[in-house]
Structure formats: C-alpha cells, structure tokens
Image (spheres, rainbow, N blue to C red):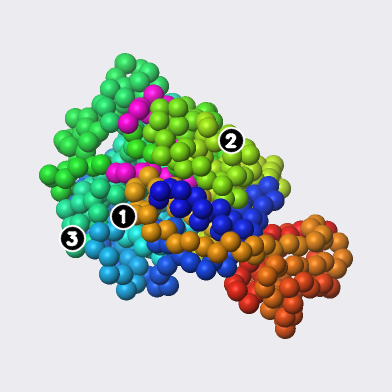
Amino acid sequence: MAIKKLNNKLKLQSMKKIVLSAVAALSIGYAAQAQDRYVDEVFTTVDYTFGTVYGQNYHFLPFHDSPITPGAPGPIPPLGYTPTIGNMTMDVYQPGGDTETDRPLVLVIHSGNFLPRYINRSATGDKGDSSVVELANRFAKRGYVTATPRYRLGWNPNGATLVDRTRSLLTAVYRSIHDIQTCVRFFKANAATYKIDPTKIILVGVGAGGYVTNAYATLDKQEETALDKFQDDMGNSVIDTAVWGGVNGMGGSLNVYNHAGFSNDVSTVVNLGGALGDISWLEAGDVPMIGFHCWKDVFAPYDSGTVIVPTTGEPVVDVHGTRQAIKKAVALGNNADLVAANFTDPISLRAYSLNVKAQYEGLYEFRTPTTPAGLEEGSPWDWWDSTTVVATGTLLGIPSSGVGSNGSPNNLHLSGLLTNPNMSATKGRLYIDTIMKFAAPRIAIVNGLFDGSISDIQKESSQLSVYPNPISANFSVTVLNQNIQSVKVIDLNGRTVQFYNNLNSGNVTLERGDIAAGTYILDVNTTNGRFTRKVIFK
C-alpha cells in the first residue's frame, strides 16, 4: 500500500514538474501542494556542527586534521612521514527544529582521488566541497541526520610499476573503508545523542567516495583482496593485513579499531561517478545500490575499464563501473524492492529510456556532451570558487600556469574546466536536483520510511511549455491553471541576463532582446510556485 501511494504521489507530482533535459542533467521545478518527509524538503533550516571527532587512527600525510607537522615537503607516498595517531573529524547537519527521535542517517563521502585536495591536482577533494555541502543540506532538509566525514588520504600515483601504484592506491581505499566503518560505529554508539535509527544508515559517495561506498557494501571477505589483479609479483595480496588489519577494520600494526561492540552494517549505498573494485565482490544479500554516472566519464569507467591516474595518466587497476554494478545488483535481487516500485515520474522514465528498468533499476545515466577540449564530463555536479582554488594551489607550491606531465594546465581551475566546462553553482545544483529526485524516493522505499500516510495530491496539471526551443527570436511561455508573474533568463554562471516582470497571465509572448546565443535557464515564477527549464538561444 505504501509503495502504491508513493507511486501515485510521484506520478501526480510528475504532472507538476518540468523536466529540464538536453543531453545533460534533468532537473525539476514544481509547485507541490503537499510534501512528504524523506522525499521532499520539509525543513527550511539546518543546524550545523563542524569538526566533530568520530575516531582516531594513524595519519600518513600532514593534511586534513593530521597531527603530523608539515615541515619540509615530504614525498607523496604515505610512509614518507612518520605515521602518527590523530583525530578524524566530520561535519554534522540536522534538520532545524526537528522533533523526531528515530531518524535515518546519511553519510556523504567526498571525492579527491585519495589525495588531499589541490595536491591531487583537482579543485575538489574534501568534506567542504560545494557538491558535498549541497547534498548534505538537501538530505537534512528532507529530515535525515547527515554527516560529511573526512577520511585519511595518501598513495603514490608516481609509482614506478603498476604493482607499486596498485598497492598504494588499494591500501588508501582500504584505509578509507576502515574510516567510514569507524564513523558508522560512532553513530551507532551515539544513536540516542544524534536521535538516529542505527538500522537505517545510507552511504552516498561522490567520485572517489563512490569507490568507497561500493567497496564498503561488497568487500566482506579477506580473500576478495587477493584476486589476481590485486597481487604483487610474488603472488601475495597488495593489502598487508598485518599492517592494515582485516576487512572489518580490526587488527593491523598501523590501524586503530574504534567503538568496539557495534557493527559496520549499513542499509543502502549511493554512488556518484565511482566504480566497483571487482564485480565478483557483489553478491546476493548485499544492500541495495543506487548509482549515477556520466556515460563517457574519462576517469571512472561507466561499464568496465582501467582506473587512470588523473595526475599522470598512468593505469592502476581494472574496475567495474556503475552500469555493471547496478545490473548485477538487480540480477541478484538486491534491488528487488526498487524493481517492484514501478516508478512513473519523468526522471525515472528518462532513466529507463536509456537503460531498461528490468535490468538496471537504480541506475541514472547522464548523457553529457563532449567538452571543447575533446574530453567527456565526469562530475558535472561539482563547482568551486576559482580564485580560492588558484590561490590555495599557489600556496601549496602548485604553479598557476604552464602544463603538467599529463598535458593538463597546472592552473587547477583551468584543469578542472577540461572535464567540467561551464562549471557554476547553477549548473551543479541542476544536476543535484536530478540526483535527489531520483535517489530520495528510492532510499525511502528500501529503508521502509513510508508508513502508509503518503499525502494525496490533487490531480491538477501544472505543466510548463516553452515554444519554440531552441529559440531564434520571440518565444512563448505557458503554464496551465495558474498565472505567470515573472520570467528570468539566467546564464550558466548564475547571472540574470533578462528579466520580464508584471506579466500576470497564463500565456505570455516575450521578446528575445539582446540575449546572446547559448544555453540558459528559464526561471518562471507563478501564482502557485516556481518552475525552471533549460532553453537554448540560437
């Protein structure tokens, strides 16, 4: 009954939501008459706690809360510094004014190639990344307790051999899994304090964080770290359990086990642009998986392929991408509740048009265009402040001009634009609109967050149309059953380039004026709500 009511809600909302689709993101603007916790944003404020300590462990680089004194720059390989025990921290987001005492928990795990932000030759890679903060706020406003943990970083992308690179990268991933396990156990140990339900913990990984979430959910046997591709020249696993401990986080001479007595179990994992270390890890009974991926991501394969070091272009290890992982999760029955839900909203239908539901329920594919540099977008939900990125990179000794060994600009901002052109807060949030609208109802279903009290929504069509689109001269905007108050034309940098006010009509014809050719967002305010639509001016 609860799933049927949810389907009705999504179907009815789909008549009120406008799908913004070119070859990139779908986003939705709508005027909803009722909202439901965990699916919609029902809170307007969020309470923050920054720098909460969730555990302690050995650090290997003088970054990200590390107790290691930077001193003279050391080599990137983790053991270039003396391992030192220090705190691991996170930021916590809670819905403002919430009175619930048994709330699900979401951990949003940041990206960064398992190296510190900027050192990784990237504009992103920390819990303060714009997309991570945005996702955390979006979940908190839906009623979740949300946390953004830092995890320990450090490996050697400049290793002389494939084995060297594989060993150091897999070790970094392994440590990050232990850190997220520590964070999960921390919240279970403090469930009453944070008013969470310890049986409903969702991991959401962005980029490299997606590798962590996928591995967290599937790497549960030590022998799975000893597959042929994870072995050194002597036939031994590149993961030394005597040093790093077992897959459950226990043991190891350079590993501290925190919060004993609590399990590492989680209920759902969501991956944005990461991959799975090996498809054999995924077995029947693993938790449901939801995944988002750009179809030609150059760094993390969408189907199967080799991880490439962004800083050097060197290969590291073969992995299986989001499409393959979701396909197997469906085949094994792990996503059975999602398959049974029969979503009929526009975003789901768009997903199914690219990957048939019966085989790929839980997968959302972004069809991003080739960039001016001839590359493909991989994380279009990311954005950053270019001035801060370049200035901080300079302080860390990263040149602001010239090119690196892989041919990319040393300027971190320009390098990021190679695979994320037109980067802006507006663009990133549009992608996150899609991510939330696809993921939120699915997370709610598999975690049993509907109790049969889903609101009935009036069957009133509130559909926006723009004609023509692409636009060459004047154009018309129509919204059924309500009046348009104003229309803004916003460029992909978030700037308003045209504003039409005092319209007061359900159908208006607008002059193009001096709007330059390009892609824009049409922001339409009506008597009942706000709609957005991506438009192209010729």
Please indicate whether residue 193 sits to the left or right of residue 38 in the image. Answer: left
Q: Residues within 10 Å of mark 3 (few under 14, many from 20)?
A: few
Residue at 25% x, 42% y: name it.
265
Q: Is residue 275 magenta?
A: yes
Q: Considering the image in quadrants, where does the C terminus appear?
A: bottom right
Query: How far apart are the alpha carbons under marks 3 and 1?
Result: 12 Å
Q: Earlier in the sequence, mark 2 or mark 3?
A: 3
Query: How far apart are the alpha carbons under marks 2 and 1?
Result: 29 Å
Q: Amino acid at mark 1?
A: Leu
Q: Nearer the viewer, residue 60 or 358?
A: 358
Q: Is residue 137 visible?
A: no
Residue 374: x and y, percent? 69, 42
On the image, numbered disc 3 is attached to which residue? 192
Marks 2 and 1 in Cβ contact (< 8 Å):
no
On the image, numbered disc 1 is attached to which residue? 105
Residue 263: x and y, percent? 19, 42
Please indicate whether residue 429 sits to the left or right of residue 46 in the image. Answer: right
- Badge count: 3
Residue at 40% x, 70% y: name it.
43
Q: Amino acid at mark 3?
A: Ala
Q: Is residue 239 visible?
A: yes
Residues rendered magenta in the picture: 266-285
On the image, numbered disc 2 is attached to which residue? 355
Residue 175: x and y, percent? 29, 40
Please indicate whether residue 386 sits to the left or right of residue 177 in the image. Answer: right
Residue 411: x and y, percent? 57, 55
Residue at 53% x, 32% y: name it.
358
Q: Amino acid at mark 2?
A: Asn
Query: How far apart are the alpha carbons under marks 2 and 3?
Result: 41 Å
Q: Earlier in the sequence, mark 2 or mark 1?
A: 1
